[in-house]
Each structure stands twice: as structure tokens, then as C-alpha cells.
Amino acid sequence: MCADPGIGSPKNIILVIGDGMGLSQISAAFYNVGRKYSLEAFPIIGFQKTYAANNLITDSAAAGTAIACGCKTKNNFIGVDPKGNKCESILEEAERFGLATGLVVTSSIQHATPASFFAHQPARNLYEDITLELLDSGIDLFIGGGKQHFERREKDERNLTQELKGKGFEIFDYFNNDLATIKPDTLKRFGYFTADKEPLSAIAGRDYLPQAATLAANFLKHRSPNGFFLMVEGSQIDWAGHSNKTEALYEEMEELDLTLQKLLEFARKDGNTLVIVTADHETGGLGLNRGTSNLLAPKFTTNGHTGVMVPVFAYGPKAELFRGIYENTEIHTKMQQAFGFSQN
Ligand code: MG
Ligand code: ZN
């Protein structure tokens, strides 16, 4: 098996997932910001079908697994097929091909979406087991919450932060280190905890994603001449949807827009980076109704997820692969194709 980067293949892929970000969430954000939204700069648009193996309404575990591993699975499953067999993720495959890899999220790092890229478990809430898999992964960088599962484990007395250091990681956290003080070119591997449990919502003051995503892209580029895979998640768009809070949604979408601006800037300068933006599913069944004085009156129709297709935006080398309507599992296949990973 070999990486065969065909003509025009990107060296790097940055996959951005807005958890729960359907077309309504994006449209609402467009109207709300009153300026050009970063997604309007993406030349290639597609749609993906989000359903799970056992349910037309997916959860973030099955959808994350589909996107990360190319495998339709049951809700609640992480990185395994419906029978429980392990599926290799694009991040793991990238590591196998000698690329640098990273995850940057606004949830805990053990949450379903990021976990789908490095863990293989029959249930998404097995946080301590998921944490152990991060330790054993070849990942070079992670930024997110969930510090407690490394340091105050219920199962055993292990201090996984110490063990991470033993594996060449430098570990930082929100309490002791400002992200701006981290010098990526001096590090080999690093983890940055943005919270003990779940990070704050954007409306409560969280704003690290643009800076963290930029830091990650620069670090990974420096780290590997062969290229990198980076997944960035706007995790809490979904939570705003579950709680039916429009103002919270706007703040989450604003942070994602600023992040996308930074990542596009990186990709433009680099010239060798494919940026893909999509969602795992829509959350809240958001309708954009007519309000008073020509204003939008967004209205949620559920506290759960819905089955509507979600858009895919692509920018950079091999972006054209992402045109059309396809299964969520094909995001994985298309990333493999873009990287030139041959399958046997
Ligand atoms: Mg998520
Ligand atoms: Zn959700």
C-alpha cells in the first residue's frame, strides 16, 4: 500500500465539522452577520445524506464514524461497524502514511465527533476508555476540553497526563497557559486542555477556535513535510440546536465563521491544502420564518436531530470531488482519494 499523490493532490486536508449545522443554521448566520460569510468563498458545494445504519435520524457517533471511517454504523457506536468490528479512520490512515494529525474541538476531546477519529467503542459515553485510546493513538496535537478524564479517573489510579508526557507530548491548559504563548515550532507533539469538562459556550465567552485552528494548521505544517490531516469541530452548534436557543446559535456560527476565515487564509497561502466544511447532521429542525419588520423569526421544531441532508463545501486541490449528492460515508472515501491513499 502506498500514498500516490496524483496530479493536483493536496498535501494537507483540513476537515471542519459544524456539529448540527444544517442549511437553516447557515442561512440564519448569513442573514445575521450582515457581511459576506466565509462559506461563500468555497467554490464547490455538495450534499450528503446523514442517516445511520439503524435509524434515519443519526446521532453524532454514527455520523462521526461515517465521516471519519467511511462506515455506516448504529447510533451510539464510535469507530466500529454495526457488528462492532473496528473501522480505520482517515486520521489513523494518515498516520500510517506518515502524515501529521490533529484534532481541535469546542467540546471535550472524548466527545462523539472527535472520538470517531481515534477511538473504537460500542458506546459513545465510555469516556475513560475513549481517553485511553487517545493516549495510544499516533495523534500529534489535540485541543479541547475533557482534562478530568486524564487526571481523575474512576476506573484506575493512572494519571494519563503524565503518561502523555512520557509519549513526547507537551501538555498545556487554559488555566496556566494562554494559547498565544505556545510556540508551535518548538514542539513535537502537544495537547491543550480548554476545559476540565466541557468548554464554555460561545455566548458565555468561549472564543478560542479561530486561534486554536490556526495554531494547529501551522504546527502540523511545520511538524510534517509529508502533509497533515486536521479535523476542526464547531461542537456546540448542536447544543444550541438541542436547547433551541437562537442567540446561542448565532454566537457559535460567528466563531465558526471567524475560524473558516483563518483556515481559508492558511489554505490560500499554502496552496496545497484542501479545506472541507460539513456537518454531521442538522439539529433542531430549524425553520426560518417571517418575523416582524422584515426580520427573520427562526423557529426550532424539535429538541433533537433531523434527517435533512447537510451541505458540504470544498476549497483547494481536489475540491471538485465533493460535488453532487452522496452518502456521508463518501466524505471518507473522497478524502482518501484526494490524499491518494490506495486501497488494498
Ligand atoms: Mg460533536
Ligand atoms: Zn446532538
Image (spheres, rainbow, N blue to C red):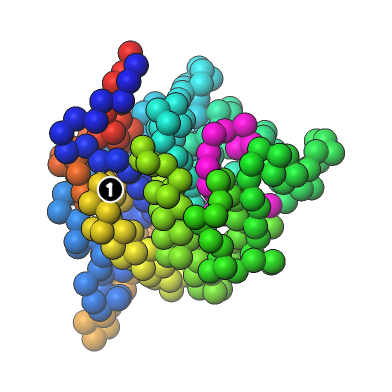
Task: Name the foreground residue: 151 vs 95.
Answer: 95
Q: In this view, does 86 lie above or below 44?
A: above
User: Would you say residue 142 sits in the magenta stretch?
Assistant: yes
Q: In x, y percent, where is residue 16?
A: 37, 51
SS category of the residue bearing label 1: strand
Residue 156 appears in which quarter of the rendering? top right
Q: In this view, does 196 lie to the left or right of 139?
A: right
Residue 183 image point, x, y percent = 53, 61
* Position in image of residue 218 (x %, y %): 41, 55
- Residue farthest bottom in this picture: 293
159 left or right of 57? right
Residue 330 in view (yes/no): no
Left or right: 104 with respect to 322? Answer: right
Task: Check the image and report above or below for 103 versus 26.
Answer: above
Does the magenta portion include 83? no
> Looking at this view, is 292 or 248 the one in front?
248
Task: Point out the image quarter for the C terminus.
Answer: top left
Instruction: Determine which residue is flagged by label 1.
Output: 273
Residue at image position (60%, 37%) is 134
Three-letter code for the amino acid on which mark 1 is drawn: Thr
In screen coordinates, is 176 left or right of 220?
A: right
Find residue 154 and report its horizontal and vertical position in percent.
Answer: 81, 41
Q: Write down the region rendered in magenta.
A: 134-147
Number of labelled discs?
1
